[in-house]
Amino acid sequence: MTVTALDPRTALVVVDLQKGILGLPTVHPVADVVKNAGALADAFRARGLPVVLVTVDGGAPGRTEQSFGRREMPADWADLAPELNQHPSDKTVLKRTWGAFTGTDLDAYLKGEGVTQVVVVGVATTAGVESTARHAHENGYHVTLAVDAMTDFSPEAHDNSVQRIFPRIGETGTTAEIVALLP
C-alpha cells in the first residue's frame, strides 16, 4: 500500500455496489466491502467532497467468450446497497459498460466540481473498478484505490489487478489510510 496524498478536491467513485451484483459469489465478504465503501462515503460527505454512486443495468453490445448474457434484469437489480447511505447531494451515474466514464457524464461532472483526484471502490475489481480507474488515469485524474472496499469473482484476477495493474495507474491503500489523508 502506497497511498501518499489526497488532493484538496478528491471525489469518491463507488462502482456497482448494487443488489443484483452483491448477490453473486465474491472472493471477499461483500458485507465488509460495502461497510468500508459506506465509511468512505460518510467521510467524504462530512468534508463536503463529491460522492459518485455508479450502477450498471446492461453491457456493451459486442460478442465475448464469457458473458452473463443478455437477459431481463429484476426491477431491483440496480438498487444501491443501503449501507452506502445515499444522500441527495450524491451524483448517480447509470452505466452500460464496465467503466463509469464511457457513455456517461461522469468526466464533465467531475471537472465541473473541480475534482483532480478520485478514489475508486466497488465490484468487480477487474471489471468496473479497474475500467473506471484506467479511464480516470487516462483523463488526467490522480487515482487512489481502496483495496479493502473492493472485491472480485476470482482471487487470481483480483490479486493481478491490485498487485500489477493498480500501481501503474494510481496508488492503493486501505479505507482507514485514505480517511486519515482526507483534507
Image: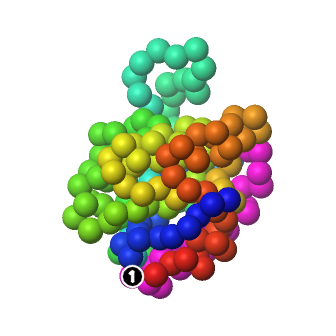
Q: Is residue 50 left or right of residue 175?
A: left
- Residue drawn at point x = 45 percent, y = 42 percent: 134
**Magenta span: chief secondary structure:** helix
Q: Give coordinates of residue 70: x percent, y percent.
A: 49, 25
Looking at the picture, does residue 5 appear above or below residue 75? below
Residue 152: tell me if it is visible: no
- Give the position of the N terminus as an image quadrant: bottom right
Residue 63: tell me if it is visible: yes
Q: Residue 17: within the magenta?
A: no
**Which amino acid type is marked by label 1?**
Gly
Q: Give coordinates of residue 33: x percent, y percent.
A: 68, 60
- Residue drawn at point x = 42 percent, y = 18 percent: 62
- Residue drawn at point x = 63 percent, y = 60 percent: 2
Which segment is the magenta one? 26-48
Q: Which residue is mark 1?
A: 48
Q: Give coordinates of residue 139: x percent, y percent.
A: 32, 47
10 or 22: nearer the viewer: 10
Q: Residue 47: within the magenta?
A: yes
Q: Give coordinates of residue 165: x percent, y percent.
A: 58, 40
Q: Is residue 153 left or right of residue 120?
A: right
- Residue drawn at point x = 61 percent, y = 44 percent: 125
131 or 96: nearer the viewer: 131
88 or 49: nearer the viewer: 49
126 or 60: nearer the viewer: 126
Q: Secondary structure at mark 1?
A: loop
- Rendering quarter of residue 17: bottom right
